[in-house]
Image (cartoon, grey):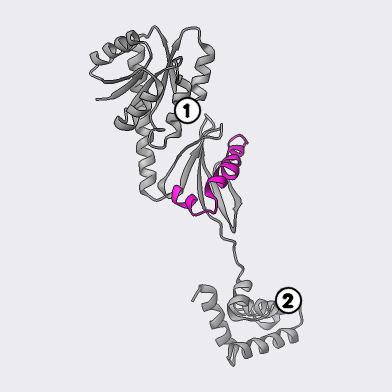
Amino acid sequence: MYTVLVVDDSPDSLSLINDILEKEGISTLVALEGSQAIVIAEQIKPDIILLDAVMPKMDGFETCIKLKQNRALNHIPVVFMTGLKDSDNILKGLNAGGVDYVTKPVNPEELIARIKRHIGNAQITSSAQKALDSIGQTLFSVSRAGELLWATPQTHDFLSNIPHSDDWLSDCLIPFVTEISNAKVEEGSQFKLSYENGACELTLVTIQESGDCTFRICHFVESVSGEDKLKSKLNITSRESEVLFWLSNGKTNKEIAVILNIGSRTVNKHLEQVFVKLGVENRTTAAGIAIRTLAGD
């Protein structure tokens, strides 16, 4: 069955909630304050955490923030417990990372229903994330508020190879994708973001009603034209590479002249230079070399 961690500085509240959960066959862990709750969560990994909002020392909001900052614990749903009139605390709890709240005194049926719903949602999310992890996608999700919700192991590996990755993540990537999350951008849109000595391509995969966005990140590769590839690989001039490129596409000298807006004699002169530089005697052999070069051979 499920395991629930209940965090409350009131022994009476802990006892009451423990009785409610035990009647449902739910295992209960208890903590009297925030730091103790974090230690227990790290050791046991409960399915859900019921967290009192107002506690001495570390209150529920700070506790929730610390839980969400811990990569091993941030997937665990947190439900705040608060008084009937504490509307400010309800909003504060949700902003801290809580998924829901229940009011005191606790309604047993409502409490059980909320626990089962949020555990079920968390399990679905966890299964989906594990599936994404297993297929090797460099995906990550960010909330509208700019919080990194999760990232696949492949994404962590990708980011670790970027120079000054921590600074780039906090100063560049997160602000950039947060801006996208808050703008009217269509799914599938692509963006380029630079980093030291390189750049990456971001694709907006999905955007939820909540504003949470999932992105794919990969290295950005500048496209190289066929002419530039021939120039670089064969050590010929820009104009020679243009002539050779169209020759490899089956164009006649007259057609090449029209395409490049030069005279036919000029095309012939460039081809003569190409033949010399490639060490060939005819256009067929030159075209063959160009085709293999463009194919990557």
Q: Which quadrant of the view contains residue 175? A: top right
> Residue 279, how many percent across, how many down?
58, 91
Q: For the residue carrying disc 2, how many other residues have a C-alpha within 10 Å: few (<14), some (14-19), or many (20+)?
A: few
The correct choice, above or below, for 168 with respect to 110 in the image is below
Residue assigned mark 2: 258
Q: Which quadrant of the view contains residue 290? A: bottom right
> Residue 71, how many percent across, how many down?
41, 37
Q: Main secondary structure of the magenta part?
A: helix
Among numbered discs 2 and 1, the one appearing first in the sequence: 1
Q: Secondary structure at mark 1?
A: helix
> Residue 209, how many percent across, how many down?
52, 30
The correct choice, above or below, for 123 with respect to 174 in the image is above
Quadrant containing the N terminus in the rendered view: top left
Residue assigned mark 1: 65
Q: Is residue 252 visible?
A: yes
User: Left or right: where does residue 94 sit relative to residue 76?
Assistant: right
What's under tag 2, amino acid-wise? Val
The correct choice, above or below, for 277 with respect to 142 in the image is below
The correct choice, above or below, for 290 with respect to 112 in the image is below
The magenta stretch is: 156-185
